[in-house]
Image: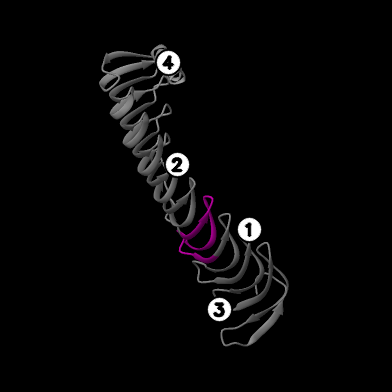
Amino acid sequence: MKQKILCYECLIIAISVMMACHTVHAKCVQGNCSNGYGTIVYENSDSYTGEFKKGVPHGRGKYVFDNQEVYDGEWRDGKKYGMGAYTFSDGSSYTGEWIDGVKSGKGKYIYSDGSIYEGAWLLDKQNGKGTYTRGEGGQYVGEWSNGTQNGTGTYTYSDGSVYTGEWKNNKMSGRGTMKYSDGGSYEGEWRDSKRDGQGVYLYADGSEYRGEWKNGLKHGRGAYKYPNDNIFTGTWENDQITGTGTVTRADGTILETVTENNP
């Protein structure tokens, strides 16, 4: 019995100490900051005005940080939870859903340079389907993972060029098609946003190349069809013909064997 009383007294003392510490670190300057509506100012000059439950923000309220960043929205058990808007010190802002204090769900982020992301979030990072519009032009619509463009998506450049295909860590990687603003197009493999692997490039002048690429250049075995319908088949290195190859006319006859770049 005495042991139970002693434990109870220890509990009362512990609660009293926590309440005293809470009082030292924060001051309720208006209203009911325990269970109701009020304004509280914290030791670090942060302030919160809104609804409280058990002494912490719960419901709707506005929190102003000492660096003038502001969160205005819903709270649960002292954490941002539900719909809310956060304005950062650099002028950027986020409006959308929150879970346990972090951006999770659907939301819109406006960056300080005017760029905008609107879509899905998870644990403070873009995750799922989303649209990113750059301030200086250009737009990506597609999949995101861990804050980067990952999966499949379409990027429209400011000059009108359009890429549709696979992405990895914000770069075109995998299979994809690029339609260039000059009328040309490439369909094939990409790596680190450069043509790399097998692919077909259709040029605006009617010529085309089918074959291997490396680091954005023709490299390896390939066939190049010229505007006059002659086709060179051979080996390329850094966009230049190397070694020997064959030139075939449109009727299928072999014209000559060459080592030059312009048959």
Reading the chain from its start, which is encountered first: label 3 or label 4? 4
Reading the chain from its start, which is encountered first: label 2 or label 1? 2
Front: mark 4 or 2: 4
Question: What is the CA distance from the residue labelled 2 to the residue labelled 3?
Answer: 56 Å
Number of the label disc, if any, that sits on residue 123: 2
Reading the chain from its start, which is encountered first: label 4 or label 2? 4
Instruction: Choose between 119 and 35: the one closer to the eye.
Output: 35
Say what amino acid the circle numbered 2 marks: Leu
Judge whether residue 168 is colored magenta.
yes
Considering only vertical position in the picture, is 94 above or below 149? above
Measuring from the top left, give residue 88's x and y in whole percent.
41, 29
Mark 1, residue position: 215
Mark 4, residue position: 9
Residue 220 located left or right of residue 206: right
Helix, strand, or loop for circle 2? loop
Considering only vertical position in the picture, is 209 above or below 91? below
Residue 180 located left or right of residue 47: right
Reading the chain from its start, which is encountered first: label 2 or label 3? 2
Question: What is the CA distance from the residue labelled 1 to the residue labelled 4?
Answer: 74 Å
Please give the name of the residue rendered at 70% of the width and 71% of the height, measured from the top-left corner.
Answer: 260
Please give the name of the residue rendered at 55% of the width and 77% of the height, measured from the top-left corner.
Answer: 228
**Magenta range:** 164-188
Question: Are the residues tagged 3 and 1 within 8 Å (C-beta)?
Answer: no
> Residue 105: which quarter of the image?
top left
